[in-house]
Amino acid sequence: MKPRANRRLPGADCGRSTLRRILFIHERLGHGRRADAASLARELEVSARTVKRDIEFMRDELGAPLEWEPSTRTYFYSRECPQLPLLRLEADEALALMLAGRTFSAWRGTPLGRALTAALGKIAGVVGGAISLPAAEISDLVFQPDEGPEADAETRFFAPALEAIRRRRELRIRYRKPGARADESRAIHPLHLAFLDHRWVLVAHDPVRRAPRNFLLARIRKAEPGAQFTPPAGFDLKAYLRGGLGRFTGGKETKVRLAFDATVAPYLRERPWHASQTIADLPGGEIEVTLRLNNLIDVQRRVLACGSHVEVLAPAELRRAIHAEAAAMATRHA
């Protein structure tokens, strides 16, 4: 099979002069300014056709939010674009980065590991917000697949999902939930890939349910691209992911208050459960932890894992759920 050639920068020279023009155009259109092709061409001392070709490349290949207004015949940025991503990862390249975790994790805590973390942070900005990874340690930054069918599924569908996000193409998937006897057919609009609770999750808009949904890559059985789609207006991806404690996200934000005894309190200080976490000291080395979450499923699991070392103070809904689960466990273990 003939190897795929990388698309070259526009223009005959395909070198420093092209890069200089692209950076000039980016700077010229910054801070809400507008410009037409003719004026940019005069300043750059090139033809208007060359400028238009550069702008097309910036928009289509570099992901720059460039728009054209026919009434004024000017170009402008439709949103803030402080940095221009001059490097774009292809889907297979991003997949290779994901699988590189087995090598990177060996350098955790070393100067090289810190350098790798910094490099991955730069790459994360380059892919245009299509992927989110925890920024704590190098071993968490890149997914390390386990052996087995789940790892195979994540590996197989990572690249198609990323490509659908970048191209804004619908995905027609067959999805198998735990305990289900058959696959479920869904048509979804992929928005983002996130590494949540040690698994890759595809955040997508479900046009039938008219709401965002999370799909584990490991549960996808088949995925085929469909028609292009327009992302839902007003959807705040950062807010959607920020309120989750694991794979479950979405819903109304809830204030969660937990009291931990002196045995586990140091661990909560050392490794916070959530970015919203605040700690208040209590007598005897105990602490009260406050979280703001938009889903209670994952925090319920963590509370149960702490056993008698934690008490739910609020909300009442979570306290009742823990009480019911603990009572059922006591009955089973009587």
Image (spheres, helix red, strand yellow):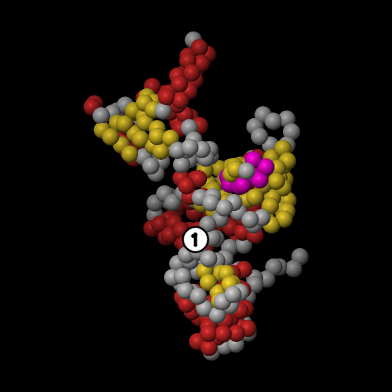
**Magenta-span inclusion, residue 8:** no
Direction from residue 289 to residue 226 in the image, left or right? right
The residue type indicated by label 1 comes to: Gly
Direction from residue 266 to residue 137 in the image, left or right? right
Q: Which residue is outermost to the left? A: 283
x 65%, y 59%: residue: 167
Q: Position of residue 234 (x, y in %)?
A: 53, 51
Q: Position of residue 54 (x, y in %)?
A: 59, 77
Residue 222 shows in this picture: yes
Direction from residue 261 to residue 183 in the image, left or right? right
Q: Position of residue 137 (x, y in %)?
A: 43, 49
Q: Which residue is outermost to the right? A: 1
Tell me the magenta residue range: 201-209
Callout 1 secondary element: helix
x 68%, y 71%: residue: 5
x 67%, y 42%: residue: 208
**Magenta-span inclusion, residue 205:** yes
Residue 139 lies, with reference to residue 280, above or below; the image says: below
Q: Quadrant of the N terminus?
A: bottom right
Residue designated by label 1: 125
Q: Nearer the viewer, residue 151 or 77?
A: 77
